[in-house]
Image (spheres, rainbow, N blue to C red):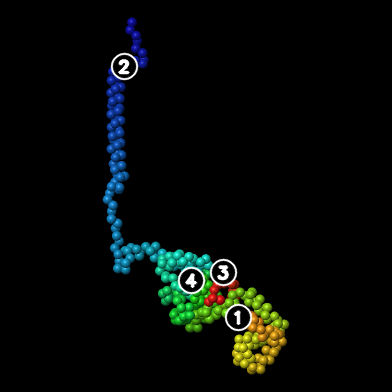
Amino acid sequence: MTATPTATATRPGQDDEDRHDGRHEGRREDMREAVRDSVREPVRESAREPVREPVREPVREPVREDGARSGQADRPESAEPPDRARQDLFKALTDDRAASEASLTQLAEAAGWPLPEAVRAIVLATPGETHQLAAVLDAALPGVFAGRPCLLVPSPDPDTRAPLEPPLRGRTAAVGHAVPLRDTASSLRWALRLLALTPARAGLDARAVFVDDHLSTLLLLQDEPLAHALAARWLRPLADLTPRQSERLEVTLLAWLEGGGAPEAAKALNVHPQTVRYRMRQLEKLFGPGLRDPRTRFELEMALRSRRLMAQVRRQNARVGRRTGRVVTADFTPLVVGRMARVNGL
């Protein structure tokens, strides 16, 4: 009795079909792999293509007659570095923190401004004139200090200022004293101070003032409270007099101290010498024998000068206030910030 084939039995020819399907399936897989390789290969070749390409020679821009590359002038960044370098150089020179010599040299080379041995600062009353003056003074270095446009000019000879006088004629300006590069900020501060103390003039009456001519004035007026303290200390004997009497004796005493005697004081005050002698007897009663002491005479002259200068500044500011309709206050804030201001070695 023959056994009935089970469900798991294979049909006739199934092995052949399986082998046939397996072979063909393998062939189809091989064909698919070949197709994928054929697709990937150009991609690999294309990715390697730039590496195999020969190096191209850089295209050189034609050079103009002035030596610049064509198209270079059209780029805004080509004109900016020198201006930026000049601004950086100006800030480095006027900063209280002393810059190193190497950094200043590097900035000067980038700015095209050779470092001089000494410089002067110029501050103009009308800021718009700064660029005009810079165009006239080829060696000037423009910049901004304390919110004011200023100029730095080389000063090879500290005692010579003749080259500055013609371009400054007809301009209200203050010129600082000649200083080494490390003291540039000092020259600027004193120029700003002197300009604030100088009455503005218009037109042909405008003129430039030089710090060199006003050293004692600037020293006496650099601190108002200190100047008041000096006057209060040495002029106390005049405190009980009337304002008119005090003013008359102050003027006489200052003229006597400056002139050295009654005849010289009388000539300066346009009065009779006997009038000066009479007033001096009054002063000797008030001040005693101290008028013959050199130190007392020196301190008295400083006190009288500072009081007179402060009165002049108040009158000047009052006139400016009437013209402009605003209140003007005298600024006696000390200018010595950071490093000590050096004024011709004083």
Q: What residue sits right under mark 4 in the picture? A: 181
Q: Distance between the residues labelled 3 and 4?
A: 17 Å
Q: In which quarter of the image is residue 30?
A: top left
Q: Which of marks 3 and 2 is in front?
A: 3
Tag 2: amino acid = Arg
Q: Where is residue 134 in the image (x, y as percent from the top left)?
A: 44, 74
User: Residue 293 at x, y = what percent?
Assistant: 66, 84
Q: What percent of the width, then of the height, locates residue 6?
A: 36, 13
> Marks 4 and 1: CB-CB under 8 Å?
no
Q: Name the N-terminal-most of marks 2 and 1.
A: 2
The reply to whether residue 135 is visible in this rendering is: no
Query: Which mark lies nearer to you, 3 or 4?
Result: 4
Q: Nearer the viewer, mark 4 or mark 2?
A: 4
- Residue that numbered label 1 is attached to: 309
Residue at 65% of width from left, 77% of height from top?
A: 230
Name the residue tied to disc 2.
11
Name the residue type under label 4: Leu
> Foreground residue, 143 or 95?
95
Mark 3 or mark 1: whose residue is earlier in sequence: 1
Q: At 28% from the left edge and 29% from the top edge, which residue is drawn?
A: 27
Q: Mark 3 points at which residue?
A: 337
Which badge, 3 or 4, is on the more N-terminal residue? 4
Position in image of residue 123 (x %, y %):
50, 75
In this rendered view, identify the residue nearer to me: 224 or 292. 292
Q: Give the crowd class for mark 1: few <14, some 14-19, many >=20 residues within 10 Å.
A: some
The N terminus sits in image quarter: top left
The answer to whether any part of residue 220 appears in the image is yes
The span from disc 3 to disc 1 (Cα, nearest Å) is 23 Å
